[in-house]
Image: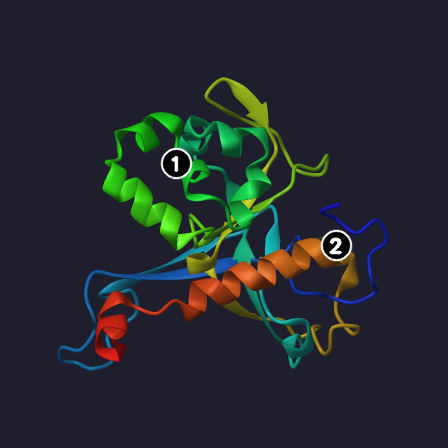
Amino acid sequence: MFYQRKMDQALRFGDVLRGYISATPNIKEPLIKEPIWPALNEGYTIGINLPIFTVVLSPCCSIGKKTIALTPLIKLQSDFFKNPYFAEDFTRINRKMEPEKSVPPDKWAEFSQAQKRTRIEEGQTYVLVNLFVYEKHDLFPKYTIRTQEINYYMIDFRNTYKLNCQEIITPQRSPLDSKCLQLSTGARSELRDKIAFYYTRVPVEDKILED
Protein backbone atom coordinates (compact mmCIF):
# COMPACT_ATOMS: atom_id res chain seq x y z
CA MET A 1 0.00 0.00 0.00
CA PHE A 2 1.54 3.30 -1.11
CA TYR A 3 -1.06 5.71 0.32
CA GLN A 4 -2.68 5.74 3.75
CA ARG A 5 -6.40 5.01 3.56
CA LYS A 6 -7.19 7.30 6.50
CA MET A 7 -5.13 10.48 6.67
CA ASP A 8 -3.86 11.99 9.90
CA GLN A 9 -5.20 15.37 10.95
CA ALA A 10 -1.74 16.84 10.53
CA LEU A 11 0.79 17.56 7.81
CA ARG A 12 3.36 14.80 7.38
CA PHE A 13 6.61 14.32 5.49
CA GLY A 14 5.72 13.10 1.99
CA ASP A 15 2.13 14.41 1.99
CA VAL A 16 0.64 15.52 -1.32
CA LEU A 17 -0.77 19.06 -1.09
CA ARG A 18 -2.48 21.52 -3.39
CA GLY A 19 -2.74 25.28 -3.45
CA TYR A 20 0.90 26.25 -2.82
CA ILE A 21 2.95 28.36 -5.20
CA SER A 22 6.59 27.79 -6.12
CA ALA A 23 9.20 30.44 -6.87
CA THR A 24 12.50 29.85 -8.66
CA PRO A 25 15.17 32.57 -8.84
CA ASN A 26 17.12 32.57 -12.12
CA ILE A 27 20.47 34.26 -12.73
CA LYS A 28 23.05 34.19 -15.50
CA GLU A 29 25.96 34.58 -13.10
CA PRO A 30 26.56 35.45 -9.43
CA LEU A 31 25.53 39.02 -8.63
CA ILE A 32 28.88 40.10 -7.23
CA LYS A 33 29.67 43.03 -9.50
CA GLU A 34 29.06 46.67 -8.57
CA PRO A 35 26.56 47.78 -7.54
CA ILE A 36 26.30 45.01 -4.96
CA TRP A 37 22.53 45.38 -4.73
CA PRO A 38 21.10 45.25 -8.29
CA ALA A 39 18.00 47.11 -9.27
CA LEU A 40 14.73 45.21 -9.52
CA ASN A 41 14.83 42.64 -12.35
CA GLU A 42 18.41 43.60 -13.21
CA GLY A 43 20.50 40.45 -13.64
CA TYR A 44 17.88 38.06 -12.38
CA THR A 45 14.33 36.83 -12.82
CA ILE A 46 11.98 34.91 -10.54
CA GLY A 47 9.71 32.26 -12.02
CA ILE A 48 6.37 31.92 -10.22
CA ASN A 49 4.22 28.80 -10.69
CA LEU A 50 1.21 27.16 -9.11
CA PRO A 51 1.83 23.40 -9.39
CA ILE A 52 -1.26 21.22 -9.35
CA PHE A 53 0.29 19.25 -6.50
CA THR A 54 3.28 19.69 -4.23
CA VAL A 55 4.93 17.32 -1.74
CA VAL A 56 6.06 18.08 1.80
CA LEU A 57 9.81 17.55 2.26
CA SER A 58 10.06 19.01 5.75
CA PRO A 59 10.51 16.28 8.37
CA CYS A 60 7.29 15.80 10.33
CA CYS A 61 8.80 17.31 13.48
CA SER A 62 10.05 20.37 11.56
CA ILE A 63 6.74 21.45 10.02
CA GLY A 64 5.57 24.71 11.57
CA LYS A 65 6.57 28.22 12.57
CA LYS A 66 4.95 29.44 9.32
CA THR A 67 7.55 27.68 7.16
CA ILE A 68 7.55 24.49 5.11
CA ALA A 69 9.79 22.81 2.50
CA LEU A 70 8.00 21.68 -0.67
CA THR A 71 8.70 20.24 -4.09
CA PRO A 72 6.30 20.00 -7.07
CA LEU A 73 4.99 16.71 -8.42
CA ILE A 74 6.19 16.38 -12.02
CA LYS A 75 5.67 13.95 -14.90
CA LEU A 76 7.89 10.92 -15.44
CA GLN A 77 10.68 10.89 -18.01
CA SER A 78 10.04 9.01 -21.24
CA ASP A 79 13.39 7.18 -20.89
CA PHE A 80 11.95 5.22 -17.98
CA PHE A 81 10.02 3.12 -20.51
CA LYS A 82 13.27 1.84 -22.02
CA ASN A 83 13.82 -0.26 -18.91
CA PRO A 84 11.17 -3.01 -18.68
CA TYR A 85 11.91 -3.48 -14.98
CA PHE A 86 10.84 0.12 -14.38
CA ALA A 87 7.90 -0.01 -16.78
CA GLU A 88 6.30 -2.88 -14.85
CA ASP A 89 6.18 -0.73 -11.72
CA PHE A 90 7.71 2.74 -11.75
CA THR A 91 7.89 2.88 -7.94
CA ARG A 92 10.77 0.38 -8.19
CA ILE A 93 12.90 3.45 -8.90
CA ASN A 94 12.42 4.35 -5.24
CA ARG A 95 14.25 1.28 -3.94
CA LYS A 96 17.70 -0.27 -4.20
CA MET A 97 18.01 -2.84 -6.97
CA GLU A 98 20.36 -5.35 -8.53
CA PRO A 99 22.78 -3.71 -11.00
CA GLU A 100 21.51 -5.68 -14.01
CA LYS A 101 18.00 -4.31 -13.39
CA SER A 102 19.13 -0.70 -13.16
CA VAL A 103 19.66 -0.30 -16.91
CA PRO A 104 17.84 -1.55 -20.04
CA PRO A 105 18.83 -5.11 -21.08
CA ASP A 106 20.49 -3.91 -24.32
CA LYS A 107 22.69 -1.48 -22.38
CA TRP A 108 23.66 -4.15 -19.86
CA ALA A 109 24.63 -6.43 -22.76
CA GLU A 110 27.02 -3.73 -24.04
CA PHE A 111 29.01 -3.66 -20.80
CA SER A 112 32.30 -5.53 -20.74
CA GLN A 113 32.70 -8.45 -18.36
CA ALA A 114 34.90 -6.26 -16.17
CA GLN A 115 32.21 -3.55 -16.00
CA LYS A 116 29.54 -6.10 -15.14
CA ARG A 117 31.72 -7.65 -12.46
CA THR A 118 32.43 -4.27 -10.88
CA ARG A 119 28.74 -3.40 -10.77
CA ILE A 120 27.77 -6.80 -9.40
CA GLU A 121 30.41 -6.52 -6.67
CA GLU A 122 28.90 -3.18 -5.62
CA GLY A 123 25.63 -4.99 -4.93
CA GLN A 124 22.19 -3.45 -4.71
CA THR A 125 22.12 0.31 -4.98
CA TYR A 126 19.88 3.26 -5.78
CA VAL A 127 19.60 4.60 -9.32
CA LEU A 128 18.22 7.98 -10.38
CA VAL A 129 19.16 9.07 -6.87
CA ASN A 130 17.47 12.48 -7.06
CA LEU A 131 14.06 11.06 -8.04
CA PHE A 132 11.20 9.46 -6.10
CA VAL A 133 8.11 8.17 -7.89
CA TYR A 134 4.59 8.50 -6.54
CA GLU A 135 2.21 5.62 -7.24
CA LYS A 136 -0.60 6.28 -9.70
CA HIS A 137 -3.82 7.56 -8.16
CA ASP A 138 -7.24 8.58 -9.49
CA LEU A 139 -6.62 12.06 -8.09
CA PHE A 140 -3.73 12.63 -10.50
CA PRO A 141 -4.40 13.83 -14.09
CA LYS A 142 -3.42 11.33 -16.76
CA TYR A 143 -0.88 12.15 -19.46
CA THR A 144 0.64 10.30 -22.40
CA ILE A 145 4.24 9.13 -22.78
CA ARG A 146 5.35 6.86 -25.64
CA THR A 147 1.69 6.30 -26.60
CA GLN A 148 0.88 5.08 -23.08
CA GLU A 149 -1.50 6.91 -20.78
CA ILE A 150 -0.29 6.99 -17.18
CA ASN A 151 -0.80 8.95 -13.99
CA TYR A 152 2.37 8.15 -12.10
CA TYR A 153 4.20 11.27 -10.95
CA MET A 154 7.53 11.93 -9.28
CA ILE A 155 9.49 14.46 -7.29
CA ASP A 156 13.05 15.67 -7.83
CA PHE A 157 14.98 16.41 -4.65
CA ARG A 158 16.85 19.16 -6.53
CA ASN A 159 13.57 21.11 -6.82
CA THR A 160 13.04 21.59 -3.09
CA TYR A 161 12.13 25.10 -1.98
CA LYS A 162 11.09 26.94 1.17
CA LEU A 163 7.65 28.52 1.44
CA ASN A 164 6.29 30.77 4.18
CA CYS A 165 2.62 30.35 5.05
CA GLN A 166 1.01 32.22 7.93
CA GLU A 167 -1.39 29.33 8.65
CA ILE A 168 1.27 26.65 9.13
CA ILE A 169 1.80 26.87 12.89
CA THR A 170 2.36 23.20 13.76
CA PRO A 171 1.70 19.98 11.82
CA GLN A 172 -1.76 19.87 13.43
CA ARG A 173 -2.46 23.60 13.23
CA SER A 174 -2.15 23.93 9.47
CA PRO A 175 -4.53 24.29 6.49
CA LEU A 176 -5.44 20.61 6.39
CA ASP A 177 -7.98 21.18 3.62
CA SER A 178 -4.94 21.51 1.32
CA LYS A 179 -3.87 17.94 2.11
CA CYS A 180 -4.81 15.44 -0.61
CA LEU A 181 -2.87 12.24 0.04
CA GLN A 182 -0.71 10.79 2.81
CA LEU A 183 1.96 8.16 2.29
CA SER A 184 1.73 4.86 4.10
CA THR A 185 4.35 4.25 6.78
CA GLY A 186 6.27 1.99 4.39
CA ALA A 187 6.26 4.45 1.50
CA ARG A 188 7.27 7.33 3.78
CA SER A 189 10.15 5.21 5.08
CA GLU A 190 11.30 4.58 1.49
CA LEU A 191 11.18 8.32 0.77
CA ARG A 192 13.13 9.07 3.94
CA ASP A 193 15.77 6.44 3.11
CA LYS A 194 16.29 7.62 -0.45
CA ILE A 195 16.47 11.34 0.32
CA ALA A 196 18.92 10.54 3.14
CA PHE A 197 21.07 8.63 0.64
CA TYR A 198 20.85 11.57 -1.78
CA TYR A 199 22.21 14.01 0.80
CA THR A 200 24.78 11.72 2.44
CA ARG A 201 26.64 10.44 -0.64
CA VAL A 202 30.40 10.83 -0.31
CA PRO A 203 32.09 12.51 -3.33
CA VAL A 204 34.72 10.43 -5.15
CA GLU A 205 37.44 12.98 -4.33
CA ASP A 206 36.62 12.71 -0.63
CA LYS A 207 36.74 8.91 -0.76
CA ILE A 208 40.23 9.13 -2.28
CA LEU A 209 41.41 11.37 0.57
CA GLU A 210 39.84 9.04 3.15
CA ASP A 211 41.66 6.05 1.64
Classed neighbour count for the residue bearing mark 2: other residues with Cα under 10 Å, few (<14), some (14–19), many (≥20): some
Marking on residue 184: 2
Horizontal side of residue 23 vs 116, given as left or right: right
The answer for how far apart the CA atoms under marks 2 and 1 are is 28 Å
Amino acid carrying mark 2 in the image: Ser
* CB under 8 Å between discs 2 and 1: no
Q: Which one is nearer the viewer's eye here, 173 or 151?
A: 151
Q: Nearer the viewer, mark 2 or mark 1?
A: 1
Q: Position of residue 96 (x, y in %)?
A: 51, 50
| Display colour scheme | rainbow
Pointer 1 residue: 103
Q: Position of residue 162 (x, y in %)?
A: 51, 69
Amino acid carrying mark 1 in the image: Val
Horizontal side of residue 75 vs 202, given as left or right: right
Q: Which one is nearer the viewer's eye here, 147 or 96?
A: 96
- Which quadrant would residue 32 be assigned to in this image? bottom left
For the N terminus, which image quadrant? top right
